[in-house]
Amino acid sequence: MICKERDFMTQYETLLHEGENHKIQITEKDFKSDAKGLIKGNRIAIRKDIPTSIEKACVLAEELGHYYTSVGNILDQTNVMNRKQECIARLWGYNRLIGLRGIIDAYENKCRDLHDMADYLEVTEEFLQEALTTYRSKYGLYTKIDNYIIYFEPNLGIIKII
């Protein structure tokens, strides 16, 4: 059976709506720098020339993660505290768009490889891979949630406990 698609608002539309509900101004702009997204206060800018709404959702999720979890200017990534805040914001984004439950939902909807999972979750394969690497760092080789075990090594694997 082929991986089922979800049928509701796109992740990007959902995040835009969430930002609107929290009085966060989100705009798409031309950037002079290589940055894909920037945040200052309650204003988030997303690079206008990002080609897909899926890629924009991944960027916006991280920027919202900064909004909810970061304090001050953390652009200087040579500072350990800034790097920690960056990791926390990224984890927030991974959890918002994917999460352990999302991995299980993708599995239950017959997604059996990273491409299908990323497609189902409406994230890029790169974003999904970074999330899995982060989850591996956080949880170790595997974690248990409800009646499932999610293995991160040697490859991603999900087992339903009956």
Image (cartoon, grey):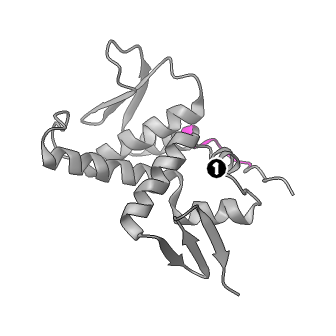
Out of 151 and 162, give the one closest to the viewer.
Answer: 151
Q: Residue at x 36, y 37 (%)?
A: 24
- Pinpoint residue 110: horizontal percent, then vertical percent: 77, 60
- Pinpoint residue 148: horizontal percent, then vertical percent: 61, 77
Q: Does the magenta segment cover residue 157?
A: no
Name the quadrant containing residue 157: bottom right
| Circle 1 SS class | helix
Q: Amino acid at mark 1?
A: Leu
Q: Residue at x 57, y 66 (%)?
A: 101
Q: Tell me if 4 is positioned left or right of 73 in this view.
A: right
Out of 45 and 152, give the one closest to the viewer.
Answer: 152
Mark 1 lies on residue: 114
Q: Is residue 30 above or below residue 14?
A: above
Q: Main secondary structure of the magenta part?
A: loop
Name of the residue lying farthest toward the right: 1
Range of magenta residues? 7-12
Residue 68 visible in the picture? no
Q: Residue at x 12, y 42 (%)?
A: 79
Residue 109 visible in the picture? yes
Q: Residues within 10 Å of mark 1 (few under 14, many from 20)?
A: some
Q: Tell me if 152 is positioned left or right of 27 in this view.
A: right
